[in-house]
Amino acid sequence: MAILIDRDSRIVVQGLTGSSGRRHGLLCRDYGSQIVAGVTPGKGGMHIEGIPVFDTVAEAVETCRADVSMIFVPPPGAAEAILEASEAGIRLAVCITEGVPVRDMVLVNRALMSSSMRLIGPNCPGLITPGQCKVGILPGEIHHPGSIGVVSRSGTLTYEAVQQLTDAGLGQSTCVGIGGDPIIGTSFIDVLTLFNDDPDTEGVFLIGEIGGTAEEQAAAWIRQHMRKPVAAYIAGMTAPPGKRMGHAGAIVSGGAGRAVDKISALQDSGVMIAESPASMAIAMQKALNAAGSGSHDS
Amino acid sequence: MKLHEYQAKALFAQYGIVIPRGQIACSIDEAGQAAASFGGACVLKAQIYAGGRGKAGGVALAHTVEQAREIARGLLHRRLVTAQSGEQGLPVNSLLVEEIVPVARELYLSLTLDRNAGYYCLIASPEGGVDIEQIARQTPERVRRLTIDPLVGLRAFHARGIARFLQLEGHLGDAAVELILSLYRCFLEKDASLLEINPLVVTEDNRLMAMDAKFSIDDSALFRQRDLAILKDDSQFDPLEVRAARSDIAYIKMDGRIGCLVNGAGLAMATLDMLTECGGHPANFLDVGGGADQEKVVQAFRILLEDPNVAGILVNIFGGIMRCDLIAESLIAAVKAIGNRIPIVVRMAGARREEGRQLLEEQTDLNIVWQDGLASAAHAIVQLLAPST
């Protein structure tokens, strides 16, 4: 059953008529996701390879019963697209857009407090429940159905981790890229909570990086609540302070956000740390073995 | 993106925030003229994109025009190394020459993002002119942090509370309320990520004045802050970083010998960590991005090869949406176009990796070595460079 998305998810693509929206919307459909509609204001009535396009998300929800939105709207309009999805009754919005202004996200973050919609991202690769449904830009073919939940602030580094897990015979229940921005809709803790309660997930691999204190908070939560083995890798041990390492949120400032602090916080909570990016799957296997549930599934 | 102090103060002035009288000087003569306009008594402040200027000699007092010229001669067109500037320091191309204002009290005020709350917050302290993080550690009761609900905004009653905390009463209290509200308006309207006045001072003649100003703008909002975006001072960056930024490549220069070309920021960081673990020293962080085309890969290669410290290159690509064979073709095209004398180790994984490998292995004369794993690739480039060290 996995978390957040499965084969029954009905997806609307906001920005389907743009080049990335179209490309990834169709790639998701090829993977098996039900792409039921697109939304681009002013393009209602169009079809993209058989997918109906509407002017508003509300119409897509009403006509096509969409419950998940994948957002490819460029930065100036991304916040509005998220708010529109929320008001239209979408259950889960996944915002892939990179470069959404922080001021816009501060407002979105506040507005979503009184909404039942969950936001993932922005600036994220999306999520996948292998073999069932993909919402985002992740490469489907490296994923394999199984029982490891993956949660990450990164994109290609997550693919690296997933490839290692798949090669080691550790399939995935769901993989969630929560995004690399300073303000994101769904935190490590939100996803850990879902994995903790998901009967299909036996263990979790967490990929963090420098900047902020999300990993430290996750560590504190894991210590108190997590019933399943967790392994983790934290990128940026060698990052110079004060420099923004690509992601808008990846910066060590004023002595906060350092990789060593995150690693020791996670270790103190019993998380198995991958010392090297080459040994992520090994760390996961060790964590499973230590918990006495080292089952291979493939 | 950062603004220089003089640019930040000019913006403050537009919002009615009182600043010292000052002039910008780019030459010794201009510094002398500015000093003369203040009767010789002035403070000269080096304009660079880093803090810690005071302790590094980047802020100096002059009592005569001749002294001001002497200070300007020592600072202008040299590099100033501060605790925050990096070892190379930053070039001083201009000085802010200001009147000397007698100060009665120094306070602290800033607005920034509270990442945990996802809200903006105001930070104030009656202890100004010093490191605020130190104050927060040593005497936390002397620092007030106010989280701002964006739907409510920062209101006059909030500002009155802060003014009280700063022990500003009577007309100074009124001035503080006005200043705090103006600062918040400026913060929002300019898409700032940090506004800091340290110190905010009460002058001996009882005025509230911003003596210093730090101003950072959210890079993601520059598309709607074009008049601020053009203020970016390229001289404050490594020339290769400037070039990379123009090509939309995330690049940070470091001081090792192994150039790195990676797709994705997280993987790029992990690649640096991997290299360091193997005893190597990365020359840079470089993320070509998710949708890199051939042109971008060529640009990235040029940047790596133009760094004289780079003695070898590690390419680490995870093909997802970006296919390995297309990247391999781009690499080959780049090396052929630019020419190459140094060893390149390529590691690829993901979509169409075998096709990429085949393409690269057909090119036997390009000094490109293929490796399957992340660890083995890092070891390989470290070993290839080992004999020459």
Image: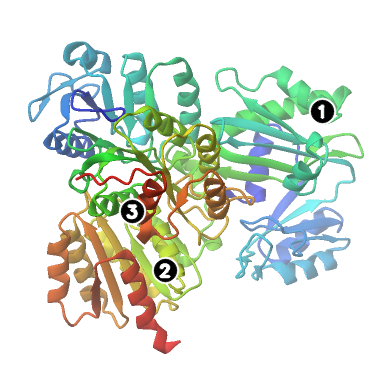
Q: Identify the residue position indicated by label 2 in the image.
A: B275
Q: Nearer the viewer, residue A252 or B210?
A: A252
Q: Residue at x 36, y 54 (%)?
A: A280
Callout 1, which amino acid? Phe
B54 vs A41: above or below = below
Q: Residues within 10 Å of mark 3 (few under 14, many from 20)?
A: many
* Between B257 and A223, the one nearer to me in the picture: A223
Q: Earlier in the sequence, mark 1 or mark 2?
A: 1
| Cα separation between marks 1 and 2 | 50 Å
Mark 1 — residue? B165
Q: Which quadrant would residue B72 be assigned to in this image?
A: bottom right
* Amino acid at the residue labelled 3: Ala
Q: CA distance from mark 2 to mark 3?
A: 19 Å
- Quarter of the image for the C terminus of chain A: give it: top left
Q: Marks 3/1: CA distance?
A: 53 Å
Note whether B153 is above or below A134 in the view shown: above
The residue closer to the viewer here, A149 or B117, is A149
Q: Which residue is mark 3?
A: A281
Image mark count:
3
Q: Residues within 10 Å of mark 1 (few under 14, many from 20)?
A: some
Q: Position of residue B31 (x, y in %)?
A: 74, 62
Verify CB contact (< 8 Å) between mark 1 and mark 2: no
Q: Secondary structure at mark 1?
A: helix
